[in-house]
Image (spheres, rainbow, N blue to C red):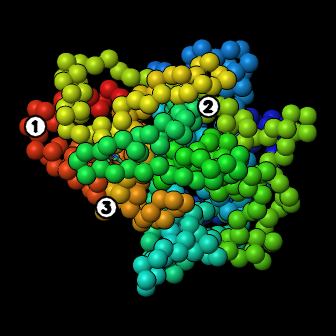
Amino acid sequence: MKAPLQKVLLALSAIGIVTAGAAIAQFAPPGGGRPGGPPAPGPATTPIANFGGPLIGLNAQQRAAFEEGAVEFRTQDTPETGLGPIFNGRSCAECHSGPALGGGSNVTVTRFGRVNESGQFDPLLALGGSLLQRFAINNLALERVPAEANVIAQRKTTPLFGAGLIEAIPDQAILAAAARPQADGISGRAALITDPASGQMRVGRFGWKAQHASLLSFSADAYLNEMGITNRFFPTENAPNGNQAVLARFDRVPGIEDAVDPETGRSDIDAFTDFMRFLAAPPRLVMSASARAGESVFATTGCGGCHTPSLATGNHPVPALSNQVVNLYSDLLLHDMGSLGDGIVQGPAAAREMRTAPLWGVRARAPYLHDGRAPTLDAAIRAHDGEAVIVRNRYLGLTPAARQQLLDFLGTL
Ligand code: HEC
Ligand code: HEC
């Protein structure tokens, strides 16, 4: 919830006139961390040409919704507007900013849980799992990874370019991709989830575990779980490590914090959704001769068995999203990635299952993989395991020249 005055203050603080009043405390991870909370976002990142623009073909009203959504996406919340008591960031843009607004970043969040004696995964809900909130509006509310946890995973911020196009791919198209005959030991499956916003059974496609199907649901989830802002789909505040007494002491804003405008029925989560829905796909670079050869190597090596070059959107009320080819390089399915899996069971996704990472825009998001462990594209491919073993071994058997062509191709996406 943001009053107009708050927006003025935020605008002033962006140019350094007002300093944040609240003392923000931080969970200190083993690697140490920055005291005083996350760095305040500086001036807007310099966009690389064309990353972060709106879709082509939007009408004036949709274009305005994109711009207004971008403002909300950048707006920092404060304890007075509902931030926290525990949180991971103060604005969406704090994490989703590279190489332009709406992108990803090296910011990771921590997930934890416990595998018990019988091999069952317990997300430790009663202790605040599985997502850790790393910061708090007061030191006394800080979360820790509980001693009970024996699985701890980092997840890197994923970019949102072209998210509206991915959202507009019909469930049927993803189910068809799962049902098609698959070679090379690959057997992806669709992530069937209940969409919190619509209450419908849908095919998940967003997040490392394909945990959401719609941008409105992801916005509502992120607003609560990354920023601590309760909203109409997620009305219950997170208790620090599950402790209701601590929550009661530090939850300053009662009720639903992302207030719905009675006239429009809309709130901030709808504005975030507009911004992400109308974000253009990552722009591709012109291919060199080597990259063109690499496109064939990508196909013959079998990368396309999971990284499907394109899917198509269905009929959509927004013409710019209707019946479009989406060159995302993903089947949006969950695959058993063996040792590369992050160990967290989430929705229908098992511990070792991960969503095929869309490769569009991959040139702008090193380091790679869900936890950013791979500094180069080559290292990312070598870390593929599980269902990808046959294809990975084929990659390892390529001549150095063919491997370079493949990497040159990825460098144009
Ligand atoms: C602290 C950093 C952080 C903040 C703040 C944050 N996000 Fe994210 N975002 C992430 C991470 C990390 C992921 C990947 C999470 C996962 O899959 O478990 C993600 C994933 C997403 C995705 C899925 C994209 C895809 O297809 O993979 C959407 C949509 C999204 N965020 C929207 C938002 C919105 C809207 C906000 C503001 C309300 C927001 N995020 C705030 C870190 C952040
Ligand atoms: C069995 C399915 C499968 C096959 C085959 C496969 N991948 Fe992947 N790929 C994935 C999944 C799943 C991820 C995300 C894994 C993670 O980070 O945990 C991924 C991630 C990546 C990433 C990192 C993306 C990022 O955002 O960090 C790159 C690059 C990549 N794959 C390239 C390739 C190439 C090139 C090939 C062919 C040699 C290939 N992959 C074959 C499933 C596959």
The x, y position of residue 266, in whole percent, is 81, 38
Measured along the vertical axis of the image, is residue 214 above or below residue 57?
below
The residue shown at (15%, 45%) is 394
Q: Nearer the viewer, mark 2 or mark 1?
A: 2
Distance between mark 2 and mark 3 Cα atoms: 33 Å
Residue 33 visible, this orientation: no
Q: Amino acid at mark 3?
A: Gly
Q: Secondary structure at mark 1?
A: helix
Distance between mark 1 and mark 3 Cα atoms: 26 Å
**How packed is label 1: few (under 14 Cα within 10 Å), some, or many (20 or more)?**
few
Residue 115 or residue 94, whichever sits in front: 115
Give residue 262's quadrant in the image: top right
Give residue 96's quadrant in the image: top right
Spot the residue most to the left. Answer: 399
The residue shown at (61%, 62%) is 133
- In screen coordinates, is 72 left or right of 395? right
Which of disc 3 and disc 1 is earlier in sequence?
3
* Image mark for residue 277: 2
The x, y position of residue 27, in whole percent, is 58, 66
Which of disc 3 and disc 2 is earlier in sequence?
2
Q: Which residue is mark 3?
A: 338
Which quadrant does the C terminus fall into? Answer: top left
Give residue 97's quadrant in the image: top right
Which of disc 1 and disc 2 is earlier in sequence?
2
Distance between mark 2 and mark 1 Cα atoms: 40 Å
Question: Does the CB distance between marks 2 and 1 fall below 8 Å?
Answer: no
Q: Secondary structure at mark 3?
A: helix
Q: Amino acid at mark 1?
A: Pro
**How packed is label 2: few (under 14 Cα within 10 Å), some, or many (20 or more)?**
many
* Image mark for residue 379: none
The residue shown at (16%, 36%) is 403
Asked if the beta carbon under badge 3 is closer than 8 A to the nearest atom of ligand 2, the reply is no
